[in-house]
Image (cartoon, rainbow, N blue to C red):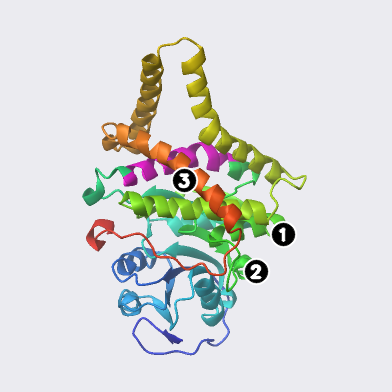
Amino acid sequence: MHISRPDGAPRAVVDIPEPRRATCVLVASHNGEKNIANAVAHAIRQCAVYVVSDGSTDRTAAVAREAGATVLELTDNVGKPAAIHRALRDLDIVARYETVTVIDDDTTLEPGFVRECLAQMHSGVGIVVGKTKSDWSSSVRWNPWVAARAFGYWKYQLFVRRGQSALNVMNCISGSNSMYRTDLLAEVAQESTPYIVDDTYWTLEVHRRKLGRIVYAPRAAARVQDPTSGREWYGQNLRWLWGTMQGIRGHKIGRRASLFDLAYLGLILDWVLYVVGWPAMLAFATLTSGIDPLRMVVVYLAGYFAWSVIGAIALRRWALIPLFPALLVVDWVQRVNFVHAFVKTIRQPTVESCRWESPTRYAEADAA
């Protein structure tokens, strides 16, 4: 383990005691030299930045240090949860700061992100979740996987996340751009988590142990890079859904009389209807109602096209309109994803390690 200041000079892990500062940004990165400078450059305009290099074999640590971050270098690749746990401890972040924003090495914080999150960090609030935007740069403008993810972020945050925030029943936080009370994060961050997605575990622990409210800050925006190939998109989505279902099983969601459990059961019902119910109803109506199947298909396509137009207007991304046939295909692939994740959860309800390979990143210039 090696800790150094931005100028490259080593420093003691614990400095002379001083009053806790408001906030900082923490980035866990494994072989992220391609994007880490961009992530640090945007974050450091708003507060101090710390980077933990998780056993990187490239120049992640050096590039982050050159960009102005204080860097903790781990010799082994331990995975994001363990890297964050060690950074909180070895960089003494809990004693130094009241809050910490955890981001990924491909996250670009937009101006005012930290300020907007701090404004929502009222008494009783433990986590503030930022607004996630897809980094839909010019090189991936016509990529259907990136377009589908951007469309999905918009729908989810508009219709689900706002309501969940108001009721304090948020079941999913953004692991790439959320602010935590440091004492809360120290409570839930462990060397290893039982689920493949660390922030799923953190979210459920916060609700079960009543450690604080989780609120959404739509004005605190950050751009993240999404998979550009079908294989990487499927793999990342599968990991997210698998981790979610592991959490549902492991934390016994639905077995307690709480608003959180009730809301989560409602969300699970929505998933079932999405994966099984809607296709079944479409098939049943086509086979038994006497309606021309072609007409049913036309109505279905028209409805999805209308949603694509609304999304294009809301996001000001007109590529969504001609890409709508591809979005439709991705939507059905997502249903397969759900089934795959369900089977995977039955076979492997817990994991011993949260190490994984990140999807291919774009060129750094595109993210700047």
Q: Residue at x 55, y 49 (%)?
A: 343
Q: Residue furthest right?
A: 257
Task: Identify which amino acid the numbered label 2 is placed on.
Answer: Glu
Please state which of residues 155 and 315 is positioned toward the viewer in this rendering: 155
User: What segment is highlighted magenta in the picture?
Assistant: 145-163
- Verify CB contact (< 8 Å) between mark 2 and mark 1: yes
Please state which of residues 363 and 14 is positioned toward the viewer in this rendering: 363
Q: Residue at x 58, y 39 (%)?
A: 163
Residue behind mark 2: 187
Q: Secondary structure at mark 3?
A: helix
Rendered position, 238 above or below 181:
above
The answer for how far apart the CA atoms under marks 3 and 2 are is 32 Å
Task: Identify which amino acid the numbered label 3 is placed on.
Answer: Asn
Residue 143 lies left or right of residue 16; in this view the side is left
Name which of mark 3 and mark 2 comes first in the sequence.
Answer: 2
CA neighbours of label 3 inside 10 A, class few (<14), some (14 to 19), many (20+): many
Where residue 282 sits in the image (x, y, percent)? Answer: 48, 23
Residue 237 lies left or right of residue 318; in this view the side is right
Residue behind mark 1: 209
Residue behind mark 3: 337
Where residue 156 sits in the image (x, y, percent)? Answer: 48, 41
Q: Secondary structure at mark 1?
A: loop
Task: Identify which amino acid the numbered label 1 is placed on.
Answer: Arg
Rendered position, 14 above or below 215:
below
Q: Secondary structure at mark 2?
A: helix
Can I make out residue 60 in this image?
A: yes
The answer for how far apart the CA atoms under marks 2 and 1 are is 10 Å
